[in-house]
Amino acid sequence: MTEREHPLPGGQVNSVVRIGDTVRRATKRDMSLQHALFAHLAAKGFAGAPRFLGHDEEGREILTYLPGEVFYDKDDFSDAQLVAAARLLRAYHDATLDFPPVRAAGAEILCHNDWTPANTTCLDGLPSGMIDFDTAAPGTRLWDLTYSAWMWLGLGEPVWSPQHQRRRLVLFVSAYDHPSCTPALVAACLPARQAGRIRFARAQGLPAALAWAENALDWTLGNITGHFHPDGLD
């Protein structure tokens, strides 16, 4: 008897279903880099990523299912959750240091490039797994950590004070704990990451996403970047 398919939430780009202890995804791009990455992570003992098991009769990827809850549209995380998230990202980055495509590119690590709460599985409320590596590419720790800090903290949302968000940013970056990434460096890099999302939203004709990213950039410049790097113009 064939096991039933259970559609999984998310999957804004690809259709994703669960069958037993596997996930099936219809992909539209070459995923050979990601498949090699999953094998590398398994060999390094990193348990926070799925494993690639091949393709099914419909040509869909077969990945192992990572148990846990996914927090969609949430950014009011506790300090313990933020610390666990930053440490998971650090462990992932460390595991990619000797990944052959990273070395071939002369890069530092393999960026996930979209590591958000919506791409995280959580056990007992704490981040434990990373999913959706579609945009992974060689890069730097700072570039990847900066984007994740923006997403995990919800920078630009008006429900928190600038002081509260600066404290959470310091907490997140400190938990990542690498000398190449300081709160001041993340604060300097944030506008570039946000500008990239603005460019993408404009090119794709996504007015709501464009407005959201523009608002985040304006708030960040005034309350995060300007705090760590005052320009004397006020």
Image: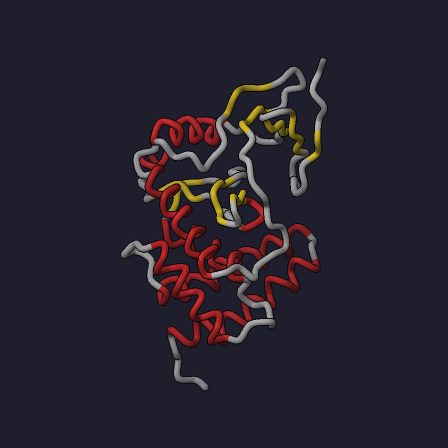
Most extreme residue toward the bottom, as rendered? 234
Q: Position of residue 61 (x, y in %)?
A: 58, 25
Where, by quadrant of the figure, is residue 100 drawn? top left
In depth, the one of 153 and 69 nearer the eye is 69
Q: Tell me if residue 113 comes above or below residue 229 in the rendering.
A: above
Q: Position of residue 162 (x, y in %)?
A: 50, 75
In depth, the one of 111 and 118 nearer the eye is 118
Q: Residue at x 38, y 50 (%)?
A: 87
Quick check: 132 left or right of 188?
A: right
Q: Residue at x 59, y 62 (%)?
A: 213
Quick check: 85 left or right of 43?
A: right
Most extreme residue toward the front, as rendered? 124
Q: Residue at x 31, y 40 (%)?
A: 106
Q: Tell me if residue 207 comes above or below residue 41 in the rendering.
A: below
Number of callouts in the render? Answer: 0
Q: Residue at x 27, y 56 (%)?
A: 179
Quick check: 124 left or right of 145?
A: right
In depth, the one of 197 and 145 nearer the eye is 145
Q: Is residue 33 visible?
A: yes
Q: Position of residue 79 (x, y in %)?
A: 45, 61
In depth, the one of 30 and 183 nearer the eye is 183
